[in-house]
Amino acid sequence: MTLSRDSLRNDSFKQKMLDEAPGEMSLMDENAFEASRRFILQKAAQTGELWVFAYGSLIWNPIIEVKDKRPARLHGYGRRFCVWAPIGRGTPECPGLWLGLDAVERDNPPCEGIILRIDAEQWDEETLILWRREMISGVYIPEWLPVETEGSVKQCCVFVANPGHDRYAARISWDRQVEAISRASGSLGTCRSYLESLAVHLQEAGMSDVYIERLARDVAAVKSP
């Protein structure tokens, strides 16, 4: 399966995910899906800008059309593999873990990422593509949060983990995270390869994340299945 602009634009990616393991993924209610998108669009209209905080694969594979991008820091959240993935990068028998932004104590180091600006004339088209990528099943919640960037603060769309979702992995042990990521594989590839790409791209961008660095080392030490 390929995640691409075309497969999101025509919404075929969603159907392929559903067909991969019938019954393993429930879709987000269409009204809630659209309401969450309209909420962000209304917030953006108030500021005149629409920025999206990229902390994972949006950094190196945004798919959406990006007008501008800047390094940014988000307080109160941190990267964590905190969403079970029975499809995509896992199977029902051997589920993987998807990356999310999980709430942390305010005195924790900020999460370093990149903010992506969508041109005002493309807000509707590009957010629909983005929502079809991030909001298929509601495992994330789009929030409107302040981020620090280049000496200023920007209000930004941030997809955070949904702790009320049934696939939210609430504080599973370190060893369990390492086991799941080192073993799981699905139609989108392995969890291991995603983690490796994430670690490399963060390093190339000069971003520090102790959690990801440690996890990448520990997963690399486990022999591939």
Image (tube, grey):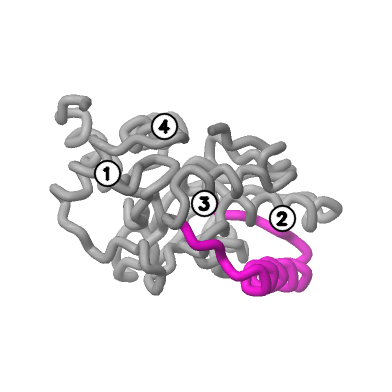
Pick the front one: 210 or 26: 26
Q: Name the residue carrying label 2.
A: 128
| Residue occupying image coordinates x 41% and y 69% | 165
Of tags 1 and 3, which is closer to the observer? 1
Q: Earlier along the polypeptide chain: callout 1 or callout 2?
A: 1
The main secondary structure of the magenta stretch is: helix
For marks 4 and 3, give the CA distance.
28 Å
> What residue type is disc 2 on?
Leu
What's the magenta region? 25-53
Whether residues under marks 4 and 2 lie with C-beta atoms below 8 angstroms apart, the answer is no
Task: Tell whether position 152 is magenta.
Answer: no
Residue 40 to residue 183: above or below: below
**Category of crowding for the residue at label 2, using alpha-carbon neighbours closer than 10 angstroms: few (below 14), some (14–19), many (at least 20):** some
Whether residues under marks 4 and 3 lie with C-beta atoms below 8 angstroms apart, the answer is no
**Category of crowding for the residue at label 1, using alpha-carbon neighbours closer than 10 angstroms: few (below 14), some (14–19), many (at least 20):** some
Q: Secondary structure at mark 2?
A: helix
Q: Secondary structure at mark 1?
A: loop
